[in-house]
Image (cartoon, grey):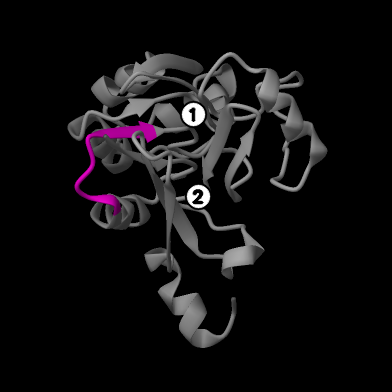
Amino acid sequence: MKVGIVSDIHCNIEGLQIALELMAPFDVLLCAGDSVFQFRWSNEVVERLREVGAEVVLGNHEETIFSPEGERALSSPRVRPDLVEWLRARPARLDRELDGKTVTMMHSSPWEPWRDYHYPHEAIWSRAAGLDCDVLIVGHTHFKMAQRFGSTLVINPGSAGDPRDHRNNFRLSCATWDTTTDAVTFYDYDDPTRRFLSHSGQM
């Protein structure tokens, strides 16, 4: 089985669409949160995730936009209530089996405090060896990661919408995971929303 993985789309429908094209064909699509911004909504991103049957968890930006702080953003007449309710109904954590392997997906750290940023080089990830899953999928940092700790494979696809990873020259990224071989393939690509900045030398 080929599993497509995206995270931290942050309203970037163009970035998400390229990711879907690069990963295709895939059997399952997983999204590790932050599909939108905390004060900005995207009908296009949420609708596309729903269209392709993505399994989505909520991130810290969804937590904010669905709180009283986000009421103003969601009150816009352009925001589709059906899409708001669909995303609001997604869980903060997903535990499921894929092709005989147990998968846990959440947006950020599996250890409290949940919103902490843990980058690939940090020693804290060694604790993943004690988790009760074959694969842990996270987002949050926007940094790509595919490392095994004990019997647990930790995957972070990077960001499909808001590049921050200097290791790939601040490009967007997504990933696929082969459930048979455990191979993780990353796809790096330019952010289509930043063409002007790139050409004008302002990046």
Residue 131 in view: yes
- Find numbered disc 1 in the image and state the secondary structure of the residue it sits on: helix
The quarter of the rendered structure image containing the N terminus is: top left
Is 132 drawn above or below residue 196 in the view shown? above
CA distance separating discs 2 and 1: 26 Å
- Extreme residue in the right direction: 123
Q: Nearer the viewer, residue 166 or 148?
A: 148
**Disc sitting over residue 21 in the figure:** none
Q: Which residue is mark 1?
A: 72
Residue at the spot 19% in from the left edge and 47% down from the top edge? 25
User: Residue 20's x, y, as percent?
Assistant: 27, 49
- Find numbered disc 2 in the image and state the secondary structure of the residue it sits on: loop
- Extreme residue in the bottom direction: 200
N-terminal of the pair, mark 2 or mark 1, is 1
User: Residue 14's x, y, as percent?
Assistant: 32, 57
Residue at the spot 44% in from the left edge and 45% down from the top edge? 9
Q: Nearer the viewer, residue 164 or 198?
A: 164
Badge 1: residue crowd in 10 Å (few <14, some 14–19, many ≥20): few
User: Residue 92's x, y, as percent?
Assistant: 51, 17
For residue 127, which quarter of the picture?
Answer: top right
- In this view, the mark in front (2 or 1): 2
For residue 55, which quarter of the picture?
Answer: top left
Q: Which residue is mark 2?
A: 159
Question: How many marks overall?
Answer: 2
| Identity, as a three-letter code, of the amino acid under mark 1 | Arg
Is 43 magenta? The answer is: no
Extent of the magenta region:
23-30
Is 27 magenta? The answer is: yes
| 48 lies left or right of 189 | left
